Image (spheres, rainbow, N blue to C red):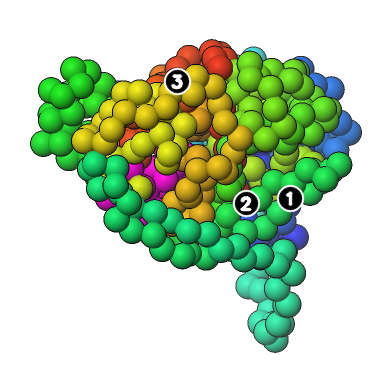
Amino acid sequence: MKKSEIQIFLAHASEDKPAVLALYNRLKQAGYKPWLDKKDLIPGQIWRDEIPKAIKASQIFLACLSGKSANKQGYIQRELRIALDTLGEMLPGTIFFIPMRLEECEIPDLRMSEVGLNLRDIHRLDYWEEDGFEQLERAIGYQFKLEPEEPKQPVIVPEEPKQPLSVFNFEVVGVNAKGEQIKKESKQSQYFSEDLGNGITLEMVAIPGGTFLMGTEDEEIERLVKKFDWEGFRWERPQHRVTVSSFYMGRYPITQSQWRAIAATAKIDIDLETNPSNFKGDELPVESVNWYQATEFCKRLSRETKREYRLPSEAEWEYACRAGTTTPFYFGETITGELANCRASETYADEPKGEYREETTPVGQFPPNAFGLYDMHGNVWEWCADTWHDNYDGAPTDGSVWIKNGDDNHSSLRGGSWYFNPYDCRSAFRNFLNRRDDVSNCGFRVVCGAGRTL
């Protein structure tokens, strides 16, 4: 048998989709025929005919499990039962269980006799180990006694046409600790626009990859704790180096008009109210949305645009906010009411007190950062994809969404808001809320491209 004749069914839970997509692409590049349910069926949905057909046509059934999804594995168990019921004793390949993260895939339910599996049919592969994919290929080769592929003439495949990027020009400003402008500079960035219908667009700015120091050094943390009498600054330690791949990020937080355009489309997991915000206005950022609602928006946006949208990781958010700066704010040493919408009646450094507006403001009316992103400081808190961790001990260094060993009921918020003090708006500042909380200073912006989950 040849690689090109082997169809591999990839069963997975939604939590592991990013990792499974990476495996799908790698299997495809290696010459196999991976099959993935890209429509992301959810528990409770009616299973389509395609699932049994795809399982029956496959030679290998890969149950891709993480420690997290193994604990609520009904999604994969159902596919597994279809496989056993459909193929019975004639199951042509080996069933593999692949831990996508290594915090341990002990899956007693799937090993019980009621499932009908022979333990000899179960292989556990540490896919994320350095030789994990080679280990998988060796197992497939042993099972199917693969024939060597005939050498082929190289074929030049034209690249899939990419959406052309547009260019926009803008100015960035810098201030000293007194809030006095000391710099003004012209910049240029690239972006593309998604058409959401009825004249509503979503502008996605190209964020170049790079390396930065995430968090705050200990000496500065202690200074902030003493000055503002708040222990939460210690959530920003330890400072660590992170390398982020290029991606696209919303030029602005999601607005109320953009929210309505997507909230009016068909439900995937949960219902969305079309007008949830406390402060009303098409160009105001949407707020009073919780983490689950923001995630539902991303899923619907992905379906409507046929492009994978998601919430940013904390690392991606901070990297994008800093835009190459190492100062507390991307403006410089402080922030003022002329630079961002926050509780400017309070001060951060030596700047004079400013206006406290007590409400959100239309997106894009304050100066952007060097990447061309607006409202990264103030206006609304922005949800991130990560589960909450009290510090950065064990944090990934590649910009990944950090889920491992986190608090599944809470997620990170970044950027500060109209309601919060200037120090809450710092590039490194971290906040969190229960994922079900929907308060009038919480919104979000979306990203696409790159991204992994750890």
Q: Quadrant of the N terminus?
A: bottom right
Mark 2 surroundings: few (<14), some (14-19) or many (≥20) residues within 10 A = many
Mark 3 surroundings: few (<14), some (14-19) or many (≥20) residues within 10 A = many
Within the image, what quadrant is residue 324 found in? bottom left
Please tell me which residue is depicted at 51% across the width and 54% down the height of the picture: 372
Of labels 3 and 1, earlier in sequence is 1
Q: Nearer the viewer, residue 132 or 314?
A: 314
Q: Position of residue 417 (x, y in %)?
A: 46, 27
From the image, tell me which residue sits under label 2.
204
Q: Which mark is residue 194?
A: 1
Q: Nearer the viewer, residue 49 or 366?
A: 366
Amino acid type at image mark 2 = Met
Please tell me which residue is depicted at 50% across the width and 40% down the height of the picture: 375
Of labels 2 and 1, earlier in sequence is 1
Query: Please, is residue 452 above or below residue 279 in the view?
Result: below
Q: Is residue 308 left or right of residue 355?
A: right
Q: Tell me if label 2 and label 1 are in contact, CB under 8 Å.
A: yes
The magenta segment: 313-330
Q: Is residue 118 left or right of residue 268?
A: left
Please tell me which residue is depicted at 83% across the width and 45% down the height of the picture: 199
Estimate the spatial distance between the alpha carbons at disc 3 and disc 2, rounded to whole Å: 27 Å
Residue 105 makes an appearance in the image: no
SS at mark 2?
A: strand
Q: Is residue 395 left or right of residue 271?
A: left
Magenta stretch contains residue 323 = yes
Within the image, what quadrant is residue 164 found in? bottom right
Amino acid type at image mark 3 = Tyr
Q: Nearer the viewer, residue 447 or 19?
A: 447
Of labels 3 and 2, earlier in sequence is 2
From the image, tell me which residue sits under label 3.
419
Q: Position of residue 137 (x, y in %)?
A: 54, 57
